[in-house]
């Protein structure tokens, strides 16, 4: 059974860092990557663009990309987007044997113990972690997370196809410095933000007048 990989985020806006990681995951895992915009982010302040605008930017960003799809299941559900609920829903439709993975950046990974029912995530899916500048997965892991990941390390992506859930894979890729907050603050301050996002997304930000207010 082909591995299904879910990549959740606020994507406010989607940037080149997100896309680079999604492409690397697609190529290394041989999996379709489902980019899932969150409806009402439980872990951070409300986003600057509406859910509809964030969805449209993602659709523009993945246009013509094989193996990257926009998955709107978290927008179609009312209330905050908790990964555990999303994965439970996927598990229900895909069955117990389907290999599933959740792709997260290193900053999200070190904050995992703050997520709703976070220890259940490994029962439901594999975790794939992308390194991120400024975050050291080796040095910054809380004790509870260290305990939880003990014995879970996968050494090759192929292992993720061989069991439905429960492994941890560190994605090998060049570090990507972009962040959505950097894009938003550069737009507001009139800096050079366009190279940080795909051209179609840049055009959309300009056309909609997004992120021009400071903060
Ligand atoms: P913000 O700057 O507003 O916090 P962000 O750039 O982190 O936003 P999100 O939509 O919150 O974007 O991120 C979605 C997921 O992608 C998270 O798991 C995050 O860790 C990861 N991610 C985002 N940018 C990068 C990057 N440059 N390198 C690695 N992971 C990233």
Image: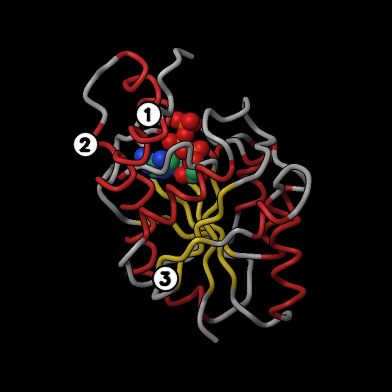
Which residue lies under the disc numbered 3?
157
Per the image, the residue denoted by label 2 is: 195
Mark 3, Cα crowd under 10 Å, few <14 / some 14-19 / many 20+, is some
Image quarter for ligand 1: top left
Seen at 47% across and 50% down, the residue is 56
Name the N-terminal-most of marks 3 and 2: 3
Q: Which mark is residue 47?
A: none
Q: Position of residue 72 (x, y in %)?
A: 60, 58
> How far apart are the two marked residues, 3 and 2, measured between alpha carbons?
31 Å
- Determine whether, in the image, residue 130 is placed left or right of residue 10: left
Query: How many dots with numbers?
Result: 3
Q: Residues within 10 Å of mark 2 (few under 14, many from 20)?
A: few
Which residue is at a point 73% across and 51% down the rendered structure image? 119
Q: Quadrant of residue 136?
A: top left
Percent of width and height locating residue 193: 26, 28
Q: Position of residue 76 (x, y in %)?
A: 70, 56
Of the numbered discs 3 and 1, the one sitting upstream in the chain is 1
- Tag 3–tag 1 contact (CB < 8 Å): no
**Nearer-the-camera pick, 164 or 201:** 201
Q: Look at the numbered disc 1 and give the secondary structure of its residue.
A: loop
Identified at 58% across, 64% down, the residue is 126
> If the image is split into quadrants, where does the N terminus sit?
bottom right
Q: Which residue is mark 1?
A: 134
């Amino acid at each position: 059974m082909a591995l299904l990989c879910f990549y959740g985020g606020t994507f406010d806006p989607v940037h080149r860092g997100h896309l680079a990681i999604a492409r690397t995951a697609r190529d290394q895992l041989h999996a379709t990557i489902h980019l899932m915009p969150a409806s009402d982010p439980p872990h951070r302040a409300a986003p600057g663009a509406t859910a509809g605008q964030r969805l449209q930017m993602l659709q523009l960003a993945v246009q013509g990309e094989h193996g990257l799809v926009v998955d709107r299941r978290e927008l179609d559900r009312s209330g905050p987007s908790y990964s555990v609920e999303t994965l439970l829903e996927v598990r229900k439709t895909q069955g117990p044997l389907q290999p599933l993975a959740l792709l997260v950046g290193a900053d999200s990974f070190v904050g995992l113990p703050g997520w709703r029912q976070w220890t259940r995530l490994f029962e439901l899916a594999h975790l794939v972690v992308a390194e991120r500048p400024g975050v050291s997965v080796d040095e910054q892991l809380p004790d509870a997370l260290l305990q939880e990941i003990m014995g879970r390390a996968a050494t090759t992506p192929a292992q993720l196809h061989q069991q439905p859930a429960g492994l941890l894979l560190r994605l090998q890729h060049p570090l990507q410095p972009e962040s959505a907050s950097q894009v938003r603050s550069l737009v507001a301050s009139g800096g050079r933000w366009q190279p940080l996002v795909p051209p179609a997304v840049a055009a959309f930000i300009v056309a909609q007048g997004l992120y021009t207010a400071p903060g």
